[in-house]
Amino acid sequence: MKTIIEPFKVKSVEPIRFTTKEEREKILTAADYNPFFIHADDVLIDLLTDSGTSAMSSDQWAGIMIGDEAYACSKSFYRFENTVKKITGLKYIIPTHQGRAAEKILFTLTGGKGKFIPSNTHFDTTRANIEFSGAEAVDLVVEEGKHPELRADFKGNMDIKKLDEFIRATGPENIPLCMITITNNSGGGQPVSMQNIRETKEVCKKYGIPLYIDACRFAENAYFIKLREPGYADKTPFEIAQEIFSYADGATMSAKKDALVNIGGFFATNDEELAMQSRNLLIITEGFPTYGGLAGRDLEAIAQGLEEVLDEHYLQYRIRSVEYFGERLDAAGVPILLPPGGHAIYIDALRFAEHIPQNLYPGQSVCCGLYVEGGIRAVEIGSVMFGKYGHNGELISPPMELVRMAVPRRVYTQSHIDYVIEVVIELYQKRKELPGYKITYEAPLLRHFTAKFEPVKL
Ligand code: F0G
């Protein structure tokens, strides 16, 4: 087989700025050791997120020009609505300015004290929106999903037995809906199998609980199903996506991922009453129901992006390029979450920085190290993002301590990734020099975005 190439040519470029190691040390100190505070201009390769960082196609930019900016019932809304309906088969499609706005609406209307929302693994904004409503977010990922070194095809799966037990123990009346995140971002960008989605739906149906899909990376998940699940090799990603959504009663989506745009999202549901309430809420928070916090041009770009993302050549390139990134690190002995997920490579910080105790945030230390070493920006997905405090103020850590290097869609070439690989390997060789970190400031919710740190010598 020949090399899998980028299925596009470059029409417009954006320079990146080089800095010295000494400059980066000063920049990191000024940013209180939190990469979220580093000016993007001071970053060489930005792997902070794959969200809203995609390069749009010339057809999407053309869509920006032909976007219909009518306040109500614009042409662009109907193109957007038709495209989402074609893929999801869901009845009521409500645009929002991004994924969390859809979550906010959904959980304002369905959450509340005494309610529980199970999922394979909730993303942090989903969890925060559920908790903000007073409800409790529960993660029920399969056991293999908690072991970074273990290779399995569908580590994002829901633990079906645990879900059934959880519903029986909690009472279906206290569970307004069940969610499934595809791919499972917080669990390492790992896919969920069709069989698992089907079985999750069966359990939900048995208890009369609707199933909602967090669909941010649905196309990547569909392609993993094509590659790995028996019976799907000859199906198109579009057909696979249609089957995935056929098991859903609704979905939330951040279009900033698999719709290949810089802003946007939607909430979709088959529940007429919930759709009506959502539109009422949308009007006071986001905007009129046919634009929902977006411009007509954004809706046009989303519709175009949703069509492009299901292209087989695109998905083959996308999944293979992330796999290549992981393969080379794994071959060099760098501990990463295996197998590589769809949108990112996750360093297993507990094994990378073994000498740093969890309460001194090894993941944060690896992130800081990557920046100083090579100007790379990554994000901690571990005790900083998900840590809680126990009664005595002790840190309660999540099951995994990860550092995510997310790959923006259609943005970096293979040599950019080769450079990143070299930097990660170099840092791994001098990992013993990495310090611990302590938090000097934190916000009560989603603390990782604004926390401040100080290094601690070990
Ligand atoms: N659900 C998942 C699985 C996500 O990954 C995200 C965002 C959201 C919901 C929220 O969407 O950002 O449009 O409000 N993830 C980004 C990330 C921020 O970096 O993984 P949003």
Image: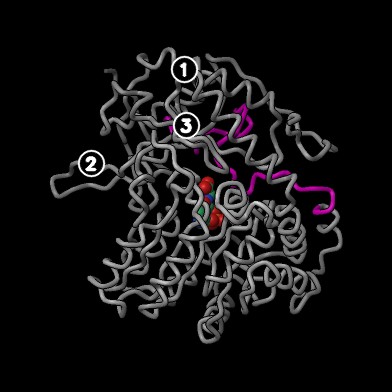
**Residue displayed at 47% across by 17% down:** 427
Give how far across and how far down residue 407 sits, in percent: 60, 38
Name the quarter where the N terminus is drawn: top right
Give the magenta part as a residue range. 31-60
Residue 254 is one of the magenta-drawn residues: no
Marks 1 and 2: in contact by CB < 8 Å? no
**Residue displayed at 74% across by 79% down:** 72
> Mark 1 is on which residue type?
Leu
User: Which corner quadrant of the image does residue 137 belong to?
Assistant: bottom left
Front residue of 126/340: it is 340
Task: Of the two numbered discs 3 and 2 on the same chain, state the one appearing first in sequence.
Answer: 3
Q: Please, is residue 117 above or below residue 91 in the view?
A: above
Task: Of the two numbered discs 3 and 1 on the same chain, state the one appearing first in sequence.
Answer: 3
> Mark 3 is on which residue type?
Ala
Respond yes or no on whether mark 2 lies under 8 Å from ligand 1.
no
**Residue displayed at 27% across by 32% down:** 358
Label 1 environment density (alpha carbons within 10 Å; few <14, some 14–19, many ≥20): many
Q: Which residue is mark 1?
A: 427
Q: Which residue is mark 3?
A: 31
Respond yes or no on whether mark 1 lies under 8 Å from ligand 1.
no
Q: Please, is residue 252 above or below residue 396 in the view?
A: below
| Residue 257, visible in the rendered structure | no
As drawn, the residue found furthest toward the bottom would be 273
Q: Nearer the viewer, mark 3 or mark 1?
A: 1
Q: Chief secondary structure of the magenta span? A: loop
Q: Which residue is mark 2?
A: 395
> Mark 2 is on which residue type?
Leu
Give how far across and how far down residue 436 sits, in percent: 31, 25
Disc 3 and disc 1: Cα gap in Å? 21 Å
- For label 1, the SS is helix
